Image (cartoon, coloured by chain):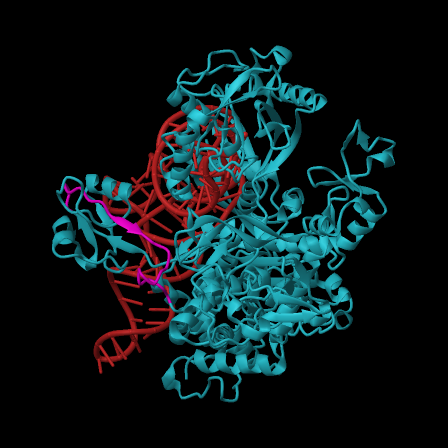
RNA sequence: GCCCUUGUGGCGGAACGGCAGACGCUUCGGACUUAAAAUCCGAUGACCGAAAGGUCGUGCGGGUUCGAUUCCCGCCAAGGGCACCA
């Protein structure tokens, strides 16, 4: 019987599970072995089942894990389920089943699919984010966030108790703007300036104020802010979940509306999240995406007085802008506020009130998306108010315009029309003054029809004239700071993380709310707070979350006071923010993770997953990790030392024929230029139009192509043909989704694994091509034949997984030929190095070459067969285990020793030296590897072929690159 | 508009200063077979040539170098990210 992959794969999958073959060792068991934590991004178990993209990353980490185990490393390689989330809940609503049920069914299906791929996970450590024993600790981390604040002096999170203590001790005081500062009297400064009280002490606050003050410092806090409300999903979404004004999930419209929501103070960590990227071995492009998302801008806040306006207490009003170009302050010819800016109502003049209101109403009625769509045409309205430029007391008009966003900076800008393109367009539109205050450093004039936005030399700016922009900015900031009309600051685009959702299927907050809506945390001992069983978990159609219908569950009386539970739930990201920690100690009932285990295993040595999490999961997880680090719960500042993004697997190539613009002849197959070029020469376009999957549509392709003998096609000489061959993302609607179940059924898991790894570099985006799978299938069958001698179904031998393994008649104890031995040792080196560099495609190519050698052999020496099976084991583990057993081993090879190569055998005794003349290859010499340079050059010039190219010319230079080539330069 | 990534045979890709196209697919030819499948052997970048051999060739245009797919400068195209971010 021939190679029966189904039986073999079942047999070994059973064996691995029964024997817990991939159990990670405890630090004690491991002794002085090295450790490696190899992690996959755990999947969201959707109803659709595994996608071919999942096995790509999972196979990659599996190969690395299996390889490292064979190298004697203690490997932790776990898997789990990120099972809270919107799709499960939406599906549950649609089918009227409880999300618990669908989630369990989906997890079972995912587990089956993952196990059928032969992935070497330590199943003892499986986690499920929806398990109360898991989300108990998600809630626990939330409590840590709630009970902590960010100490800007130490630049880290600390217990809120510490803050209260410092306030009680009067080391800290409360500034009028609500900020907490060092007590100036501690530095010998006065806390009282004139008759006006500047700062207040803790004991001078009443109980409500104290509570407010503390609540405003927490890392998890409630705030009434404009949030992204998605009507269709019935929930709010984080900035990261909104793309182009639509929900990332489902693409539903999202509106801004003010709601009281839980926020996490990720902005406090902006600088550390930015700085620590430098320490990570991550793809540069992904780091760049995080940098852009954090969006650091260095600049200044500048205060403009509004001389004609007083607040209700009779204090003069002021207006603060943020700018990255303080050096252009003299060029500010007007100010612009966001239409939603709270100051607008206070300063608008009687005459302008009507038009300002109308404009603001119009803007409010439009989504962010619409606002961006017609950003080409600037709109805005004058408020009737004027402000004073602090640098020169110039009186400038204040406008409102929707190109200024309330959500960035202070929601107000100083407009410098000469040096900002948007301001320039606005000024042109409304005929506002444009004043040049920077000239190009290299001389030459700036373009007249647009803003000069680069740095240069300040001009028309009395105190900074002649200074380069950077110095000019510094001087302006110094001046403003001296006069208390501004200060240098760094602004981040990153916003605090909106952390609550109006959903049922998420972690409940361990929070009680009193009648005023103040939050009180549950005690750690009260966790987990489990989701109430509800038959009606549908959205309410209002911002009221489904849990508001939970009846008794909601009511809590404590110390004689009535509370109601928080009815929002946490977003899907909560569970995935820390799952990598739980794998280390998944059954611990006392702690999140045992500190010794945490220190042993962290950080994650290799993390593989899709790039779609660049600014969501990967930013959130880093943030939580840093908080846990500050609070002493984890030992490393970063969770994922090395990260690799697997490239997207696109759908199968699609070929399209279409009319060209002239409505003329048909367009046909292959990418534009190639086809066009081909059409001009009339030569063979592609030999295999049929076999590539191109569909012959009607007669048209036949009109353009003539069939050659043997099934190839040729372009008719004068046709103009364009071929559109492209592949698209796999999607249900396109009908190009490949189902892993079918591939494994038809070809086996080993072949499937090989195929995905052989498609190309792990990081590259590449199209699926079912046609190519057969290559890997042939390889597996060929290895089987080469090592078992079982040729085809007719030779009468029983085999397959359930049968007792029979010894092979192809294996011999004869010594291996010298040349083959050298090839083997080169392969051992290459395969090991390629795995370490995640270059699986070239490693597989090496295995194929080695197997091709065996195909040509009469019988295969054990000296070659055994190392070959070990080298193949990480890639085709089932096949390798079966062959290993048939080679007479009674132990699984999962912990067998990886072969070692002998460096002596890497060098060939003879070498082939190409000889170039003027950089062109003219001959090749086969020489003893010991030949000296002088002899090689003599031999090279002695070559007849070389001589014909050198004759009659002067040799200018003779070059020898040791072991590589000779180049003779002649003139 | 800005940032990042990628452009190599009929296809996926390899080489990443030193023999361009490893390896797989496809196609063609041969062996085996009553036949087919499977398997095995050989060929497969283009052009010229009967052959030996030669010329061209890694998106395009320059540059550095004895030598460039590889490094530098300038374009073009595709994919991804950000986007009125002050």
Write the residue at 78% across / 54% down: A161
Drawn side of residue A497 relative to residue A380, left or right: right
Picture coordinates of residue A221 (x, y %)? 64, 53
Is A406 above or below relative to A537?
above
Q: Position of residue A693 (x, y in %)?
A: 26, 59
Residue A954 visible (yes or no): no
Say if A550 sits above or below B6 in the image.
below
Q: Relative to residue A716, is residue A433 depicted above or below?
A: above
- In this rendered view, identify the residue nearer to me: A232 or A789: A232
Taking the spot 48% from the left edge, 73% from the top edge, the residue there is A99
Question: From where the camera sits, is residue A318 visible?
Answer: yes
For the residue pair B26 and A241, the one nearer the viewer reads as A241
- Marks counted in the figure total 0
Query: What's drawn in magenta, residue-wise?
Result: A716-738
Of residue A822 and residue A516, the one placed in the foreground of this image is A516
Residue B57 appears in which quarter of the rendering?
top left
Residue at the image position 83 percent from the left and 48 percent from the top: A168
Left or right, A952 with reference to A500: left
Magenta span: chief secondary structure: loop
User: Residue A640 location in percent, x, y?
Assistant: 63, 55
Query: Is A834 colored magenta in this rendering?
Result: no
Q: Please give the letter of the chain rendered in red.
A: B
Residue A521 lies, with reference to residue A916, above or below; the image says below
* Chain A pictured colour: cyan
Quarter holding the C terminus of chain A? top left
């Amino acid at each position: 019987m021939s190679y029966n992959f189904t039986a073999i794969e079942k047999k070994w999958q059973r064996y691995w599970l029964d024997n817990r073959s991939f159990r990670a060792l405890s630090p004690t068991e491991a002794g002085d072995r090295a450790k490696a934590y190899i992690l996959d991004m755990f999947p969201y178990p959707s109803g659709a089942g595994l996608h071919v993209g999942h096995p790509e990353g999972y196979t990659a980490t599996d190969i690395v894990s299996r390889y490292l185990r064979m190298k004697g490393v203690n490997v932790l390689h776990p898997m789990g389920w990120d099972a809270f989330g919107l799709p499960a809940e939406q599906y549950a609503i649609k089918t009227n089943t409880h999300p618990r049920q669908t989630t369990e069914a989906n997890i079972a299906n995912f587990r089956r699919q993952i196990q059928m791929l032969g992935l070497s996970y330590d199943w003892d450590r499986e986690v499920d984010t929806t398990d109360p024993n898991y989300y108990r600790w998600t809630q626990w981390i939330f409590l840590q966030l709630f009970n902590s604040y960010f100490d800007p002096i130490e630049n880290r999170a600390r217990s809120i108790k510490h803050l209260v203590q410092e306030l009680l001790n009067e080391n800290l005081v409360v500034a009028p703007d609500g900020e907490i500062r060092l007590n100036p009297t501690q530095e010998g400064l006065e806390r009282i300036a004139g008759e006006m009280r500047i700062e207040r002490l803790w004991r001078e606050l009443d109980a409500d104020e104290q509570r407010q003050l503390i609540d405003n410092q927490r890392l998890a806090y409630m705030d009434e802010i404009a949030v992204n409300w998605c009507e269709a999903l019935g929930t709010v979404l984080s900035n990261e979940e909104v793309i182009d004004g639509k929900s990332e999930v489902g693409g539903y419209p999202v509106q801004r509306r003010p709601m009281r929501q839980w926020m996490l103070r990720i902005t406090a960590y902006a600088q550390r999240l930015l700085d620590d990227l430098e320490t990570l071995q991550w793809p540069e492009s992904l780091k760049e995406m995080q940098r852009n998302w954090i969006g650091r801008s260095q600049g200044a806040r500048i205060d403009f007085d509004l001389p004609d306006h007083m607040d209700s207490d009779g204090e003069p009003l002021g207006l603060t802008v943020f700018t990255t170009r303080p050096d252009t302050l003299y060029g500010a010819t007007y100010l612009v506020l966001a239409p939603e800016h709270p100051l607008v109502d206070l300063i608008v003049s009687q005459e302008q009130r009507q038009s300002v209101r109308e404009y603001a109403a119009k803007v409010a009625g439009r989504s962010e998306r619409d606002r961006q769509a017609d950003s080409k045409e600037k709109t805005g309205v004058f408020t009737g108010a004027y402000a004073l430029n602090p640098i020169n007391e110039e009186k400038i008009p204040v406008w409102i315009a929707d190109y200024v966003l309330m959500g960035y900076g202070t929601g107000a800008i100083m407009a410098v029309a000469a040096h900002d393109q948007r301001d320039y367009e606005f000024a042109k539109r409304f005929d506002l003054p444009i004043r040049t205050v920077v000239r190009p450093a290299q001389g030459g004039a700036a373009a007249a029809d647009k803003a000069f936005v680069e740095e240069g030399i300040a001009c028309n700016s009395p105190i900074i004239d002649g200074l380069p922009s950077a110095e000019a900015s510094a001087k302006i900031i110094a001046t403003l700071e001296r006069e208390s009309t501004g200060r240098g600051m760094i602004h981040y685009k990153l916003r605090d993380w909106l952390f609550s959702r109006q959903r049922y299927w998420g972690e409940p907050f361990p929070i009680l709310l009193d009648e005023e809506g103040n939050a009180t945390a549950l005690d750690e001992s009260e966790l987990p707070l489990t989701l109430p069983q509800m038959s009606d978990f549908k959205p309410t159609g209002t911002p009221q979350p489904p849990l508001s219908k939970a009846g008794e569950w909601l009511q809590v009386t404590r110390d004689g006071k009535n509370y109601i539970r928080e009815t929002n739930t946490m977003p899907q990201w909560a569970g995935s923010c820390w799952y990598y920690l739980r794998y280390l100690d998944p059954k611990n009932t006392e702690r999140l993770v045992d500190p010794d285990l945490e220190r042993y295993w962290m950080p994650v040595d290799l993390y593989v997953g899709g790039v779609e999490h660049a600014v969501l999961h990967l930013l959130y997880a880093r943030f939580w990790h840093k908080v846990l680090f500050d609070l002493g719960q984890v030992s490393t500042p970063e969770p994922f030392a090395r990260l690799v993004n697997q490239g997207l697997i696109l759908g199968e190539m699609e070929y399209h024929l279409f009319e060209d613009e002239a409505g003329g002849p048909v367009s046909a197959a292959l990418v534009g230029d190639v086809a066009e070029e081909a059409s001009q020469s009339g030569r063979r376009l592609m030999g295999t139009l049929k076999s590539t999957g191109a569909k012959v549509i009607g007669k048209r392709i036949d009109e353009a192509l003539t069939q050659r003998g043997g099934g190839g096609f040729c372009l008719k000489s004068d046709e103009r043909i364009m071929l559109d061959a492209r592949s698209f993302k796999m999607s249900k609607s396109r009908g190009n989704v490949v189902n892993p179940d079918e591939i494994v059924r038809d070809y086996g898991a080993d072949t499937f694994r090989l195929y995905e790894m052989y498609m190309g570099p792990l990081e590259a985006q590449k199209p699926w091509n079912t046609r190519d799978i057969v290559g890997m299938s042939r390889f597996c069958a060929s290895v089987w034949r080469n090592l078992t001698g079982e040729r085809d179904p007719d030779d009468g031998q029983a085999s397959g997984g359930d049968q007792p393994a029979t010894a092979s008649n192809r294996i011999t104890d004869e010594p291996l030929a010298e040349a083959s031995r050298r090839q083997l040792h080169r392969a051992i080196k290459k395969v090991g190095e390629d795995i370490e560099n995640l270059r699986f495609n070239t490693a597989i190519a090496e295995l194929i070459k080695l197997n091709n050698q065996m195909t040509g052999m009469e019988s295969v020496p054990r000296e070659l067969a055994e190392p070959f099976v070990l080298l193949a084991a990480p890639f085709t583990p089932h096949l390798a285990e079966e062959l290993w057993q048939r080679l007479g081993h009674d132990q699984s090879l999962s912990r067998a020793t990886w072969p070692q190569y002998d460096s002596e055998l890497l060098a060939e005794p003879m070498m082939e030296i190409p000889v170039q003349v003027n950089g062109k290859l003219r001959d090749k010499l086969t020489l003893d590897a010991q030949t000296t340079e002088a002899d090689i050059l003599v031999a090279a010039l002695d070559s007849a072929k070389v001589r014909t190219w050198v004759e009659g010319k002067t040799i200018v230079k003779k070059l020898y690159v040791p072991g590589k080539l000779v180049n003779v330069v002649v003139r």
